[in-house]
Image (tube, helix red, strand yellow):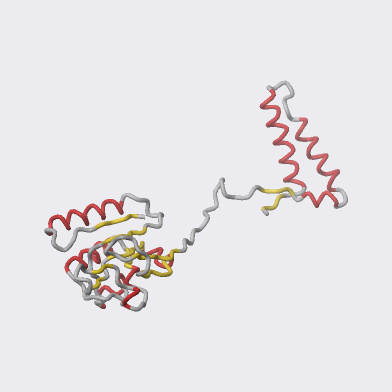
Amino acid sequence: MINIYAPTNDKPDDVKDAFYECLDKTYGEYPKHDVKIVIGDANAQVGREGFFRPIIGKESLHSVTKDGLRLVTCAAVRGMAINSTYFARKDIRTHTWMHPNGETCNQIDHVLVDGRHFSHVLDVRTFRGPNIHSDHYLVVSNIRARLSTVADSRTQRPLRFNIQRFSAEGVTDEYRQKLDERIRGINVDDNFNNLWESIHGAVSTAAREVIGTSQR
């Protein structure tokens, strides 16, 4: 989660450029496989322009502004989507900030996510009721992580021997013969640790050869 507070509209362009350079650098420092979500006060009105539709959706309240274009450009460069302008809501569920005049409301707080994980964000909406002692409304995003497990030595289930095969005729005698052959080759004069490893290996090898294994 990367929480942002972008420069306000009255700040000079060099300050805004420095902010987005810092955001881009911070975003790039995290591993590619991480689910990266940018949230906060972007102080930017995002438009509905068709050219940017894959990035911004079509549910913004505004036309794109210069500051909004900075945000859209940053998202495009990093392959992000601005999820807060993707969900259809009534205006009162989309406004995120009220002007000091008490009448004008804007949508300037946003939620952005890596495009590969776009489906993780299920909803974004504003709650006007809670008193958070701010001229901003509470913005809530419903996120569901869909994680995949990569099989490796730490996550794979251990192999189990098919011990049910011992009930078959002749299997027990075959196992005893195989184990006896393996045990005869062990150096009994070896130190305890090596001797134990040899015996354990003999038992496991004989079992695999006779009854096999399965992963449950």
Is 146 drawn above or below residue 210 in the view shown? below
Give the left or right position of residue 137, taking residue 203 as reference: left
Place of residue 5 in the rendered image (x, y in percent of width and height, measured from the top left): 25, 57
Instruction: Report how many numbered discs are placed on residues in the image.
Output: 0
Q: Residue at x 85, y 51 (%)?
A: 167
Place of residue 7 in the rendered image (x, y in percent of width and height, measured from the top left): 19, 58
Give the left or right position of residue 184, taking residue 30 as reference: right
- Quick one: which residue is furthest to the right in this view? 169
Q: Residue at x 23, y 58 (%)?
A: 6
Place of residue 1 in the rendered image (x, y in percent of width and height, measured from the top left): 37, 55
Q: Residue at x 23, y 66 (%)?
A: 44
Place of residue 43 in the rendered image (x, y in percent of width and height, measured from the top left): 23, 63
Is 193 drawn above or below residue 60 in the view shown? above
Is 107 drawn above or below residue 212 in the view shown? below
Is 96 drawn above or below residue 216 in the view shown? below
Give the left or right position of residue 120, taking residue 149 as reference: left
Q: Residue at x 48, y 62 (%)?
A: 146
The answer to which image quadrant residue 16 occupies is bottom left
Look at the image and tell me in which quarter the C terminus lies: bottom right
